[in-house]
Amino acid sequence: MATTVRTSNRDTGINSVTGGVVIVTIPNPAADKVYGTSTPCIECLVAQQSGTQAYMDIDTAAAAATGWKLSTTPISVKIDDVNKLHFFGTAGDIVQILYRS
């Protein structure tokens, strides 16, 4: 569900952008997981839920050996579609994505 968010923009003052939240759960057995629905965006904040050990990669399968280890502190990812993010972790791990379009 898209939400309207008001953000500060240095060049144009205040403007409205849309966005939303996507929750990705690592499957059992653990495998590369992609949020399957095309969700165009301009930026995402990505974090793992507390107590999980998830990894992320962009446009390629994520794995513990090659992926970016996520933490509970969100990281900013400038990307044009949420479904380009790939995740790997233990079955049941949860990754939270806040995106704006």
Image (cartoon, rainbow, N blue to C red):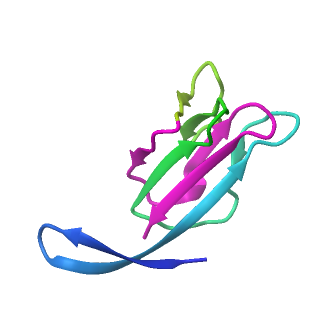
State the quadrant of the C terminus.
bottom left
Q: Assign the N terminus to one quadrant of the image.
A: bottom right
Residue 10 falls left or right of residue 6: left
Q: Nearer the viewer, residue 44 or 60?
A: 44
* In magenta segment, residue 31: no
Q: Most extreme residue toward the top, as rendered? A: 65
Residue 56: x and y in percent read 57, 36
Q: Quadrant of residue 92?
A: top right
Q: Residue at x 72, y 44 (%)?
A: 33
Please, which residue is most extreme toward the left here? 11
In the rendered structure, the answer to whether residue 95 lies left or right of residue 8 reads: right
The magenta stretch is 72-101
Q: Is residue 25 above or below residue 16?
A: above
User: Is 99 part of what is drawn in magenta?
Assistant: yes
Q: Position of residue 70 (x, y in %)?
A: 54, 34
Give the residue at x 41% y 48%: 77
Quarter assignment of residue 87: top right
Q: From the viewer's perspective, is 34 left or right of 98? A: right
**Residue sitting at 66 percent across and 27 percent down?**
63
76 to the left or right of 27: left
Q: Is residue 74 above or below residue 12?
A: above
User: Of all residues shown, which one is farthest toward the right?
Assistant: 29
* Residue 75 found in image quarter: top left
- For image coordinates 76% across by 42% down, the residue present is 26
Observer-nearest residue: 66 or 54?
54
**Residue 53: % across, % down:** 65, 29
- Residue 45 position, x and y percent, is 45, 52
Counting the numbered discs, the total is 0
Tell me: residue 20, above or below residue 59: below
